[in-house]
Structures are given as C-alpha cells and as structure tokens.
Image (cartoon, rainbow, N blue to C red):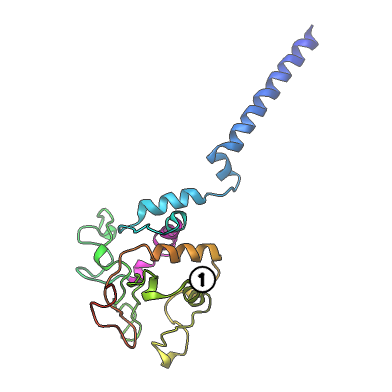
Amino acid sequence: MADRKYLKTLGTAAMITAVLGIALTHSPKGKAAGGGDDTESRIQRGFAIAPVPLNLVGKNRSQVGLGSYLVNAVGDCNGCHHATLSASSPYAPGGNPYQGQPKQVEQAGYLAGGTPLFGPFFIPRNLTPDKTGRPEGGASFEEFSAIMRTGVDPDHAHPQFGPFLQVMPWPAFQDMTDHDLLAIYEYLSAIPCIEGDPGLPNPRPIGTRCQ
C-alpha cells in the first residue's frame, strides 16, 4: 500500500514537472531565458521609439521596426547626423534628457546632417531619403551596404584624407549581418525626407531633393 502511494505521488510530481517544462518552453520569457530569438520584441520596441512619422507603404514592416531599433537604440545615428535647428543638440527645446527633461528628439532635423561636430572638414551627411524614396539621398541597398562594409566614400568628399570615411564608425557597422543592414536601410527609407545635401562636394539646390 505504501509503495502504491509512493508511486502515485511520484507520478503526479512527474506530470507537474512535464507541464511546467512545456509551459516554460512555449512562453516568451522561457525562450528569452534560454537564449532564444527576441527579434519581435526589438521590432516592437523600434516602432515605439521611432521619433518621426514613418511611411510604411511598400515597406517590410518587420525590417522597418528592427531598423528603428538599431538606428535609435543601438547606433545613436542621430547623435551625429542630426541637423541642429533650435538647439545645440539633437533634442527639442524642453526635451533634453541631459538636463533632466523627458527625452524628445527634434523631428525637423532628424538625420538630416549638417551639424559641424568634427571640425570644418567633416560634415555629417543627410541620411533621409530623397524623392526616389531611397535613403542617403538615393543610394541603392548595394551602395549603402558597400559603404557600411568598406567605409569607402562614394562622394569623395575628403580626398585629402583618402577614400575612407574618417569619423563614421563603419569598422563597427561592417560586422553587422546582411539582415541588420537591410533593416537599417529599410528604416531610413521610411523616415521623412529633409532638404539639403550637407557635406557633399556638389550639393543639389535646396528644394530639389524631396520634390
């Protein structure tokens, strides 16, 4: 009788263990704890932190969301590529977190380039799409990927320093996967176009980039 009771208890414990194991395996928290894929959470976070309205027409929504996460939460691309309009930072008046204010990015200059952060020679480029809908003023993904992988400046803006971009941290970006680079490209194609080609040897006349 005691043996039968022991076996019954053992069987119940085994069943509970199995049920808990299945629950943990199929729960999002279980997957994350086990080193599983958390891409979906990054996509959702990317949309939540995007500081400008996004044009998703014809875009891969998942890539745009992931691209926003990489550009805004990981790369801080706007930290260098913002166009300072009303303050000396990429943040809107009253939205500077370094002054204890709720963070708010200045939308009008988001990734538009032109702020001379690195001396008179190195002017951050405008990363917003042009009238073709492609980012960086009309770059194809192949061109964009080549810049990120090799650091070679197709505009030859600083021939006195050689063919390579000198400030942009492409040696870090070049180790990203093709999937991540495509996500960044897709996101940059979804943000609003802003006029101006700062840092280019032969900039287009104002008013012709976006129209």
Tag 1 secondary structure: helix
Q: Would residue 20 appear left or right of 190 to someone viewing this image?
A: right
Q: Would residue 127 appear left or right of 12 to someone viewing this image?
A: left
Q: Looking at the rendering, which quadrant does residue 19 occupy?
A: top right
Q: Would residue 68 appear left or right of 27 to someone viewing this image?
A: left
Residue type at mark 1 is Ala
User: Residue lying farthest top?
Assistant: 1
**Rendered position, 51 above or below 122:** above
Q: Main secondary structure of the magenta part?
A: helix
Horizontal and vertical percent position of residue 154? 44, 84
Bounds of the magenta segment: 66-81
Horizontal and vertical percent position of residue 160? 42, 93
Q: Would residue 118 appear left or right of 22 to someone viewing this image?
A: left
The residue at the point 64 percent across, 32 percent down is: 21
The residue at the point 34 percent across, 58 percent down is: 54
Membership of 146 in magenta stretch: no
Which quarter of the rendering shows the N terminus?
top right
Number of numbered discs present?
Answer: 1
Horizontal and vertical percent position of residue 105? 28, 60
Horizontal and vertical percent position of residue 45? 41, 51
Residue named by callout 1: 172
The residue at the point 34 percent across, 63 percent down is: 191
Name the one closer to the observer, 1 or 150.
150
Which quarter of the rendering shows the C terminus?
bottom left
The residue at the point 44 percent across, 66 percent down is: 185
